[in-house]
Amino acid sequence: MPQRGWEYDLTKCIGCHACVIACKMENNTYLPSPGEPGEAVNYRMVVLRESGFFPKPSRTFISMSCFHCKDPACLKSCPENAITKDSDGVVLIDEKKCTGCRRCEWACPYGAPQFNAKSGKVEKCHFCMHRINAGMEPACVQACPGRALKHVPDVTVGGTAPDGFAPVNLTNPSIKFT
């Protein structure tokens, strides 16, 4: 069975957040107005890792989203069976079945599931399957000016995960670091 996934070049990401903005615009994710409950829902985030000292400090940006894991912890934790994997390995949440218990959110080591306070449901990246089915790339990939992020129809997992990344043996994320 193919496993749709990501390739990510840590040396090409400049931390511009174009992927985050494109995702937010494409999916119209929740952004609370002043006085509304809850936090913003972001299917994609950019995490900054700093290391080293003068004269050689280092900054690494890590674009994070759902990694559509081979063994998703979110799927195993859902008591409503609202989370499934499709034939391409994409992990999906059925909003009709989700009760908003947030167990998937707590189980995911990558912070992918996001609770929407307005709907009372959990949401996450769905790989922009509506775009892929129309022959386009996911919005985050298309927006990346450095071409650090790539969509791969059948990913070969590998590379060295950046410092601070959850151990890959927990869920087998579908990402190759280059």
Image (spheres, rainbow, N blue to C red):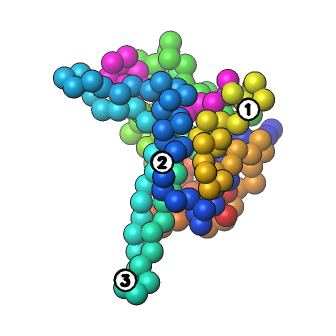
Q: Secondary structure at mark 2?
A: loop
Identify the residue at the far right of this view.
Answer: 1
Q: Secondary structure at mark 3?
A: loop
Instruction: Identify which residue is drawn at 40% across, 21% down.
Output: 121
Is residue 62 shown above or below 31? below
Name the amino acid type tagged 3: Phe
Instruction: Identify which residue is drawn at 48% across, 48% down.
Output: 17
| The N terminus: image quadrant | top right
Q: For this view, does 138 lie left or right of residue 122?
A: right
Name the amino acid type tagged 1: Met
| The C terminus: image quadrant | bottom right
CA gap between label 2 and label 3 equals 25 Å
Q: For this view, does 43 lie left or right of residue 86?
A: left
Identify the residue at the far top of this view.
Answer: 96
Q: For this view, does 162 lie left or right of residue 3?
A: left
Q: Position of residue 82 (x, y in %)?
A: 53, 21
CA gap between label 1 and label 3 equals 42 Å
Which label was assigned to residue 53?
Answer: 3
Q: Residues within 10 Å of mark 2 (few under 14, many from 20)?
A: many
- Tell me where the magenta segment starts and ends, as one range: 116-130
Instruction: Identify which residue is drawn at 66% across, 53% down.
Output: 147
**Residue linked to disc 1:** 136
Magenta span: predominant SS is loop
Say which of 106 and 110 sits in front. Answer: 110
Question: Nearer the N terminus, badge 2 or badge 1?
Answer: 2
Q: Secondary structure at mark 1?
A: loop
Name the amino acid type tagged 2: His
**Residue linked to disc 2:** 17
